[in-house]
Amino acid sequence: MSKVLVIGAGGVSSVCVHKMAMNAGIFSEVHLASRTLSKCDAIAESVLTRTGVTVSTYAIDAEDVPALTALIERIGPKLVVNLALPYQDLTIMEACLNAGVDYLDTANYEPKDVARFEYKWQWDLHDRFKARGIMALLGSGFDPGVTSVFAMWLKKHKLKTIRTLDILDCNGGDHGQAFATNFNPEINIREVTAPARHWEGGQFVETPPLSKKVEFDFEAVGLKNMYMMYHEELESLARFIPEMERARFWMTFGDAYINHLTVLKNVGMIDIEPIEYQGQQIVPLQFLAAVLPKPETLGPTTKGKTNIGDIATGEALDGSGEKTFYILQICDHEEAFAETGNQAISYTTGVPAMIGAALVLTGAWSGEGVFNMEQFDPDPFMDMLNKHGLPWTVKELAEPVEF
């Protein structure tokens, strides 16, 4: 049994804290902090109502390292779970280094002034975490996170090598809004509008954003347009599966989403450079995020399913030649909401955050330094997915999928 501090109070945090409370044998105390105390209190109230577990709440600026260090030292957790914004990864990691406490997140660092996320800044902290005798686990969400573990499970149980890998992220849900994002609007829009990058021939190849579109028939969802884009697990997968000839990431978007995004881009509303308005400096994208529906409010109206998985082709472990496997997870928005009060996008990230935290706290995954999901045995993580609301399936395909 261990004490844990969760930082951030959005939909992912809500799911994670609910699931921690449902596993009191691992998480003996759950503490929750964010800049807005009322958001923490709302999550704590829901957790108490649904599970009977009390969650302690705090107001904290995650970019204030001394204050955050003091809070960590006062609470004394065994692990800090960062579910705040990617901009705050480094300051939270710094506070964990100061306090000597293990760290976990779901998304890699991204500077506020550059729409480009990569692992370099966090990987550079490996020696400091190792010298401090503590652990940082990066990317314990769904993608990154589960998709990385899916690939390593295939390498352990099905494929000796992975020659090509495609990660397919489909949200077949409908929230009834004219335009909204299913996770933090600022991060979502920066991610979608950034240049696409995929791994091929030992290097990353860059293409214009949303320039490659393919139609794919997703189980339990149907035909959807998916677009090639960059996602951070490509960087870690390329590092830990060095034989890969090609790795790509695809995400589905409806025509209405693309049309709205195109208009917003054309009128400058997704810019990240500050402008002056009525004597104040504002960032257009941050203003847009403030007026869009909050992702955590979409749960009651969202219906449909998500389907996220990996298609991998490579040399079979049993020596039978080249094979292709598709490993995937389907999550129902309404079922996720019934359990935790949040839609499936938050659920599919919050549950893996809880699982990664559980594996660190129980010692199933351990080490000193900074680690990615690919570096650990996939089996205990995969087992917990089945037990805690994200059951997965794997099937062999007749041939590689070409798109």
Image (tube, rainbow, N blue to C red):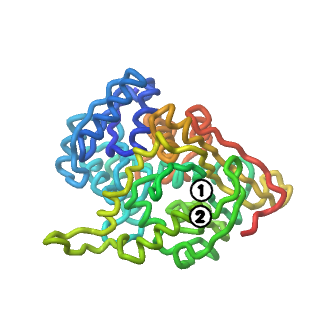
Residue 8 at what x, y percent from top left?
33, 45
Residue located 51% across and 69% down the image: 259
Residue 109 at what x, y percent from top left?
38, 61
Q: Is residue 328 above or below residue 263?
A: above
Decide: few, some or many residues near mark 1? Use Cα within 10 Å; few <14, some 14-19, many ≥20.
Answer: many
Residue located 28% across and 34% down the image: 41
Q: CA distance from mark 2 to mark 1?
A: 8 Å
Residue located 32% across and 38% down the image: 5
Sooner in the amino-acid sequence: mark 2 or mark 1: 1
Whether label 2 touches label 1, CB < 8 Å: yes
**Viewer-side residue, 15 vs 30:** 15
Q: Quadrant of the N terminus?
A: top left
Report whether 57 appears left or right of 268.
left
Query: Residue 360, can we see it?
Result: no
Query: Residue 391, can we see it?
Result: yes
The quadrant holding residue 380 is: top right
Q: Which mark is residue 249?
A: 2
Q: Which residue is mark 1?
A: 169
